[in-house]
Amino acid sequence: MGNIVAAINLRKYFPIVGGVFRRKIGDVKAVDGVTFTIKTGETFGLVGESGCGKTTLGKTLIRLLDPTSGRILFDPEGNLPDNPKIEERMNDYDISSVKGGKLKSLRRYMQIVYQNPSTSLNPRMLVKDIVAEPLVVQGLAKGKEAEERVLQILERVGLAREHLYRYPHEFSGGQKQRIAIARALITHPKFIVLDEPTSSVDVSVRASLLDLFKELQRNMGLTYLFISHDLSMIEAISDRVAVMYLGKIVEIADPKELFNNPLHPYTQALFSAIPIPDPEVKRERIILGGEPPSPANPPSGCRFHPRCRYVKDICSKQEPTLIEVKPGHYVACHLY
Amino acid sequence: MEEILSPDEQLRVKDLVVRFYTYEGIVKAVEKARLNLKKGETLGIVGETGSGKSVTALTILALTPPPGKVEGGSILFRRISGSIDDILKLREEQLIKLRGREISMIFQEPNAALDPLYTVGDQVAEAILSHRLSEMLDKAIESLKEEIKDGGGGFSSRLQLWAYNEMKKNPEALKLRLVKKLPIIGKMISKKLNQVVREEIVGLLRLMEIPDPERVIDSYPHELSGGMQQRIVIAIALACSPLLLLADEPTTSLDVTVQAQILDLIMRLKERFGASIIYITHDMGVIAEISDRVAVMYAGNVVEVAPVIELFKKPLHPYTKALLEAIPRPGATFKSIPGTVPNLVNPPPGCRFHPRCPYAMPRCREEIPELRRITKEHYVACHLYGGEEHGKHSGGD
């Protein structure tokens, strides 16, 4: 299997403006030089604390935000080669600067499910119109045919015909999220960004949503970018996991490897902070001092060095690059 | 059950019934809930949205949100004075003395709990001045006397000394109010008191492990991160060393690393202040870490109470089992609980969990199960378990 999405040195800065003339006085470096690929058919987990840029990365990947620099490669067929450095062949897949109609036709293949369905669903639209909207926008179907397809997709996500003519407020949180999922799926996309899709629902509902994601992935050949700060959930659902800190990916590995053998000191601290649902296990906690620095003015060298327990001289001077320490396990740290 | 608490008990909630009168009907939010809390213990309450856990906590402070009404039961609480009172029978002016002093609360959203228009210092000072005024006045008087004895201290010190002594007698006295209205002099009066309170707050913030408390005390809430805001809320809650701390999902809105810091802080402060804690959450991981005993709530009922290790090892109630299975674990398939939380306007008859229960029997539909003692400290409300009087014929797996 090839890859479906690749990011090469991707950056997204948000300008800070100030003064009387609203001049630019700085940048919030939300995503700052990120390179990775997502394999076709996998669930790629992205974890990090709030403010580390994971949502910005997700949105930039599907071009809901325009990248400041760097390239995004996307192939709806899912056949991107493993080494995306081969320049000439890549230009066909480069979506980092496509515009207008071409971008619109690409949107069909890339969708997003947001964190909070109460705000991502228009309260004044009927469910059937909410879910049919992508079809209408893309010009794929309308009227009776659209409704037929809406019904099909609603049934797939566990809703029924009786729900067609209702408004979002008539549903529970879990059901609303199912509507949002149906809307994302109706154009038969290949790649879906799930931006904390279960953080607004209860534990018992969460499990059923995760099940639904798994089942849809199997049956519809989907690739997910699963963004979350809930580490135990990421561990359970992902095929590979990337850990982000302050706009950078610091470690990528498959979840088993990552959770059993975290290499980056930040990953170690992050995982040791997860409360274990077993009162008899007492784990040694690495409590991080302080809080993440501001992405507007990140520390020099390795961004984690002011909070790192293994900090060396080199850490404040030189920025570590992501290197493969073991097959499939990448880490950006001077210790390795 | 007898009406008095056993010597090591701090709080007992007995058969609490809370109902909300809404347009859609009467929401039976809490139905015959029973809890008890020992001195210095941390009781975790788990449950999903709408299980009545927050309403129970607010009712312990006699702050049942409208249109809610307490329709039955009692909340016995051992006061600082040693007397035992039913909180539901106290008058409002007695409650004002109780809240924040003997029982205080940490809310879920620090952002919403703090007033955006006042500095951190002002907000912590409010708690200190409303409950520990005389203590603060004593400190101020003490330090003024020192000053005067050392030969220093002119008119201003003498004026303040007079004012504080008056304040101790009656803070609302007419002459005090008049003096406060005077220009310059009015301001002069509160100088020493403010200084003393400020020192107290800085000490408190330092205890909360807030870096640079001298700066934080003059900041507004929006200038601080979520974790820092929650530390301020905890500082306010602990400002008067309460006997009981109610924590309603205090870390839900925080990141795991910050959550770890806050949990660690709460546990260490508990040691220091010796308070009992009721910790409400839906996160089984947090429960496992922080609590001594756990109460599981479902649809307004307490369905199981057990020491934390026993609950995780040998859950008895089918709902507790389902909750534990719903925790995502790698490799395993996700087990969800079929169906949804019932509408509490029209709760299912009998056991409220029976429509979602895999072990439901005809009896479950008709008869409400009582919370029964199974082993020494393990209570469950389920017809599968006979309880002590029926011997040991426990069903289930």
Image: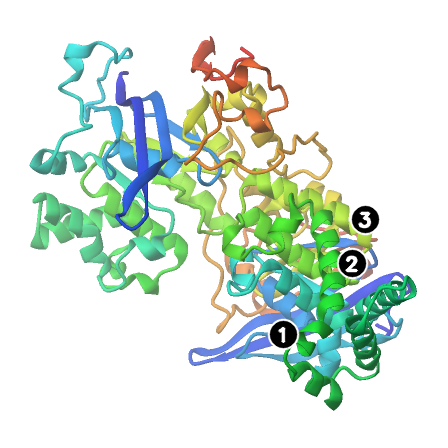
Image position, residue A210 (x, y; %)? 42, 40
Chain of the residue under label 2: B
Could you give the CA–CA distance between mark 3 and mark 1, rounded to whole angstroms? 27 Å
Judging from the image, mark 3 belongs to the subunit labelled B
- Disc 2 to disc 3: CB gap under 8 Å: no
Position of A125 relative to A105 (above/below): below
Earlier residue among tags 2 and 3: 3
Residue B69 or B100: which is nearer the viewer? Answer: B100
In the image: residue A219, left or right of residue A142: right
Q: Is residue A334 left or right of residue B308?
A: left
Instruction: Determine whether the residue tagged by mark 3 lies in a helix, strand or loop.
Output: helix
Residue at 49% across, 30% down: A235
Checking the image for residue B63, the label placed there is 1
Q: Viewed as shown, does residue B245 lie left or right of A316?
A: right
Left or right, residue B110 beside residue A106: right
**Residue at coordinates 7% horizontally, 45% vertically from top-left?**
A139
**Residue B168 can be seen, yes or no:** yes
Q: Residues within 10 Å of mark 2 (few under 14, many from 20)?
A: some
Residue A123 in the image: above or below residue B3: above
Assign a secondary structure to mark 1: loop
The mark that comes first in sequence, 2 or 1, is: 1
Residue located at (70% from left, 42% from top)? B264
Q: Position of residue B376 (x, y in %)?
A: 83, 53
How far apart marks 2 and 1 lie (CA) works out to 30 Å
Is B371 situated above or below B260?
below
Question: Which residue is at the front of the view, A304 or A23?
Answer: A23
- Residue under numbered circle 2: B373
Residue type highlighted by circle 2: Arg
Percent coordinates x, y for residue A283 in the rendering: 69, 31
Residue named by callout 3:
B271
- Asked if badges 2 and 1 are on one and the same chain, I answer yes
For the N terminus of chain A, which image quadrant?
top left
